Image: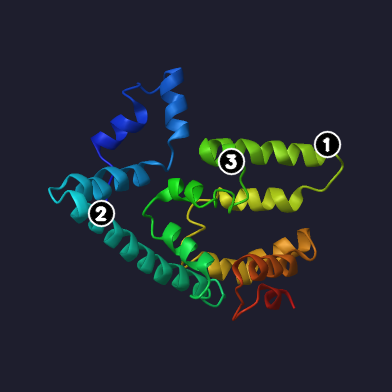
């Protein structure tokens, strides 16, 4: 298991001390970017500077990326099955782009590389500046909805869920979704589940073996 170390912290934080303006800003900006940095310095670096050189180094990086993508597809399919979805079509190029990202070979940098930085509903700058900027964007969006007389309850509920500890554990989230959370979302925002299913089918070309709408009948 790749773990970020002192080298990665030095790269990301540039020696800035915690509590200072620059140090605090760098820590907010680099949240969750330590792992992809470690992949580049340790895994990619091993292949580039591990003594093979030339074609050997290139072949090593290609082998690593192919293996990570294949394992990414397996992990992605397992997660989809737990979520009530059928695995994505392996003949669709978009499936393998998603598997490449799931494999963790490039982390957030891979999201930008293949143009998938907005797949979680974030803008370019919210994704680039880290989760703190995304949270601020959520709060501003809810405030604007309230000012315009719209009901922000569904979005506020979703934002609260995204910040609830341990809720995304693979053995917790599906049970809560089908037993509780889907019903709450549908009550707050009627038609939400049907629109959610349609979006998954259109964007991922993916079907469900257990539809979320069945949880609220």
Q: Quadrant of the C terminus?
A: bottom right
Give percent across and percent down for residue 192.
74, 63
**Residue most extreme to the front:** 55
Q: Is residue 2 left or right of residue 114?
A: left
Is residue 203 shown above or below 17? Answer: below
Q: Quadrant of residue 203?
A: bottom right
Q: Which residue is mark 2?
A: 58
Q: Which residue is mark 1?
A: 147
Label 1: state its secondary structure. Answer: helix
The mark found on residue 96 in the picture is none
**Residue most extreme to the bottom:** 209
Give the mark, 1 or 2, whose residue is nearer the N terminus: 2
Contact, mark 2 vs mark 3 (Cβ under 8 Å): no
Query: Mark 2 packing: few (<14 Cα in 10 Å), some, or many (20+)?
Result: some
Contact, mark 1 vs mark 2 (Cβ under 8 Å): no
Q: CA distance from mark 1 to mark 2?
A: 55 Å
Give percent across and percent down for residue 63.
27, 62
Tell us which disc is closer to us: 1 or 2. Answer: 2
Is residue 93 shown above or below 48? Answer: below
Q: Residue at x 54, y 71 (%)?
A: 83
Q: Is residue 57 left or right of residue 39?
A: left
Give the mark, 2 or 3, whose residue is nearer the N terminus: 2
Q: Residue at x 38, y 55 (%)?
A: 104
Give percent across and percent down for residue 188.
77, 58
Q: Residue at x 29, y 30 (%)?
A: 10
Tell us which disc is closer to us: 2 or 3. Answer: 2
Is residue 122 shown above or below 84? Answer: above
181 and 41: which is toward the camera: 41
Q: Which residue is mark 3?
A: 124
């Amino acid at each position: 298991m790749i773990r970020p170390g002192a080298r990665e912290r030095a790269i990301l934080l540039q020696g800035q001390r915690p509590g200072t303006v620059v140090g605090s800003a760098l820590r907010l900006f680099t949240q969750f970017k330590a792992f992809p940095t470690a992949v580049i310095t340790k895994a990619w670096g091993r292949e580039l500077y591990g003594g093979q050189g030339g074609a050997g180094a290139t072949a090593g990086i290609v082998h690593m990326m192919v293996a990570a993508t294949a394992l990414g597809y397996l992990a992605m399919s397992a997660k989809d099955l737990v979520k009530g979805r059928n695995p994505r079509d392996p003949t669709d190029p978009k499936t393998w782009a998603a598997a490449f990202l799931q494999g963790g070979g490039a982390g957030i940098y891979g999201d930008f590389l293949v143009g998938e930085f907005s797949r979680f509903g974030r803008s370019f700058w919210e994704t680039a500046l880290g989760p703190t900027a995304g949270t601020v964007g959520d709060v501003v969006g809810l405030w604007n909805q309230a000012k315009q007389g719209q009901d922000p309850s569904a979005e506020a509920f979703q934002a609260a869920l995204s910040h609830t500890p341990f809720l995304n554990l693979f053995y917790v989230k599906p049970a809560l979704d089908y037993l509780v959370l889907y019903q709450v979302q549908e009550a707050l925002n009627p038609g939400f589940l049907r629109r959610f299913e349609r979006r998954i089918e259109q964007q991922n070309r993916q079907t469900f073996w257990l539809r979320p709408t069945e949880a609220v009948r």
